[in-house]
Image: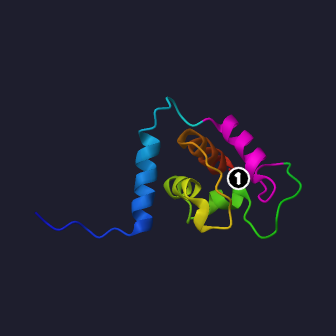
Amino acid sequence: MPAALPWTRTKALQVAAVVLLLHSDQSGAADLARGRVIATRWCSECHVTGPGQQRGSDNVPTFSEINKSEKFDAARLSAFLSAPQHSRMPDLSLTRAEIADLAAYIKSQGH
């Protein structure tokens, strides 16, 4: 049997986050409306989270910019939101369902 390919810790965390999201006990697809509520409550002080928001920090990307970034596909975004302690973002302690909702909302911005 061939040796397993080496995985970086980041890649392993990304895969784990995707598996957890896929096997979540929550039924159905992510809820964009709940994602918008979470974004407005927790993210809008720093990020421009949607159309019509007039202010945000100049030092962080807008949700539209995050959506368009090649760095953040849906899996990477979910992994990032599940472990933000490595960034300037606070740990929001979001549930898997909330992470899925917020990630889906972010990925819906800027279309």
Q: Name the image quarter holding the N terminus.
A: bottom left
In this image, 69 relative to 12: left or right? Answer: right
Q: Position of residue 45 (x, y in %)?
A: 81, 55
The kind of residue tagged 1 is: Gly
What stretch of residues is rendered in magenta?
Answer: 31-51
* Residue located at (29% from left, 70% from top): 6
Q: Residue at x 71, y 56 (%)?
A: 64
Q: Residue furthest right?
A: 54
Is 87 placed above or below 79 here? below
Disc 1: which residue:
110
- At label 1, counting other C-alpha atoms closer than 10 Å, the crowd grade (few under 14, some 14-19, many 20 or more) is some
| Rendering coords of residue 9 (x, y %) | 41, 67
Measured from the top left, where is residue 61 in percent x and y?
72, 64
The residue nearer to you, when weighing 22 against 64, is: 22
89 to the left or right of 17: right
- Reply yes or no: does residue 45 show up in magenta: yes
